[in-house]
Amino acid sequence: MNFSSRLLENAVNEFSKLPGIGQKTALRLVLHLLSQPSEDVGRFSESIVRLKKEIRFCKICGNISDAEVCEICTSPKRDKTLICIVEDTRDVMAIENTNQYFGVYHVLGGLISPMDGVGPSELNIEPLVERARTSPVQEVILALSATMEGDTTIFYIYKKLKDFPCKISTIARGIAFGGEIEYADEITLARSIATRVPYGV
């Protein structure tokens, strides 16, 4: 792609680093920003900089938060004895959109994947074990994607938690093997949560 401006080229290159954004889409986005008032572009860039500088991760569940503890963990309406384990914040948002789950979460920050060099120590697993040990947890729901990495992570967490006095369940396989939680439709995901099954090996 030929550019008439080095500044334009640099901006397009940066936008095209975003997932799912090719050079043509990046160019459209950059040209759109150029056509906007300076104040709007300033607010846009400030929001990105503030996001990176000020975003926090809940010290209890690991979810993205504006405060030390997220709104879900501090809500008196949530059932603190029920923990849903998910891969990342996108999965929290997907499950919340079903309006069928009223417990709390634990965000792992990824899945065990030896091929990618991701082991249990790189994930938020030990804090989960500590939560199960020190909190009145009655059930842990393993809501991870139905992939090889998801199943490996489920098995590892099951081995870590199986001796604790809490029920361990997985979401029902209404989600096809190889499917990602964040892409499941809300009805299927809600049904999977509602019809979860005990996990055992």
Image (cartoon, helix red, strand yellow):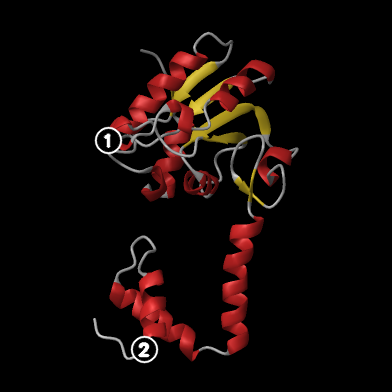
Give the residue number, with chain letter if any, for mark 2: 5
The local secondary structure at tag 2 comes to loop
Looking at the rendered image, the quarter that the N terminus falls into is: bottom left
Crowd rating for badge 2 (residues with CA inside 10 Å; few <14, some 14–19, many 20+)? few
Residue found farthest to the top: 163
| Amino acid marked by disc 2 | Ser
Q: Which mark is residue 85?
A: none
In the image, is 17 to the left or to the right of 43? left
Residue 87 at what x, y percent from top left?
Answer: 46, 38
Mark 1 or mark 2: name the one nearer the start of the chain. 2
Identity of the amino acid at label 1? Phe
Residue 13 image-quadrant placement: bottom left
Q: With respect to residue 51, does 159 lie above or below?
A: above
Relative to 172, say whether 52 is above or below: below
Q: CA distance from mark 1 to mark 2?
A: 47 Å
Picture residue at 33% right of the left edge, 62% below the top: 20
- Residue lying at 58% horizontally and 29% vertically, measured from the top left: 83
Q: Which residue has dot 1 on it?
A: 177
Of residue 56 and residue 3, the one placed in the foreground of this image is 3
Task: Give residue 119's quadrant in the image.
Answer: top left
